[in-house]
Image: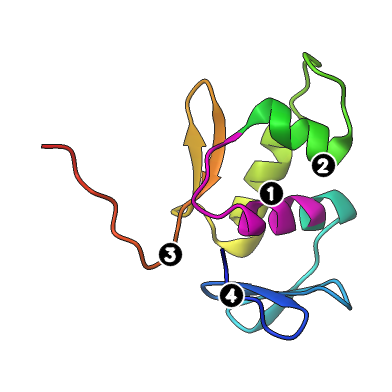
Amino acid sequence: MPPVEQDALIYGPIRVELLTHKVLAQGKFVRLAKMEYRLLCYLILHEGQVLSRQEILTNIWNLPPNVKTRTLDMHIHTLRKKLGLADYLETVLQVGYRLRSIGKKEESPR
């Protein structure tokens, strides 16, 4: 679980202020749309977990099962670009997405 500081979520250089809906990356304010903000909070709260596309679409957009849409992919792309998350927000092929745990070394396969 990510650190929570007085109504804020912290993920590396990203700080999400929950009461004011402000997002700071590297100490600079980043403007996020409502759904980008909700998606970011959801990913941070589930840091390190692989989240299926359907789980995210259901919990963030309230979409019924088996809806075909590219909105999630577009929002993931936007978060990577706006917040510099390209190295941390992973695509898990044919499953979904994972926000990599910070500070934990992944074991390499032997």
46 lies left or right of 90: right
Which numbered disc flags the more N-terminal residue, 3 or 4?
A: 4
Mark 2 Cα shell of 10 Å, populated few (<14), some (14-19), many (≥20): some
Mark found first going from the N terminus, 1 or 4: 4
Binning the other alpha carbons within 10 Å of mark 1 as few (below 14), some (14 to 19) or many (20 upward) gives: some
- How far, Cα to Cα, is label 2 from label 1? 16 Å
Circle 1: residue type: Thr
Question: Dividing the picture into quarters, in which one does residue 51 lie?
Answer: top right
Please tell me whether mark 4 sits on a helix, a strand or a loop: loop
Q: Which residues are magenta?
A: 38-51
Measure the C-alpha gap from mark 3 to mark 1: 21 Å
> Disc 2 versus disc 4: distance between alpha carbons?
22 Å
Q: Nearer the viewer, mark 1 or mark 4?
A: 4
Tell me the residue that label 4 is attached to: 3
Residue topped by disc 1: 78
The mark that comes first in sequence, 3 or 2, is 2
Looking at the rendered structure, the kind of residue marked 2 is Ile
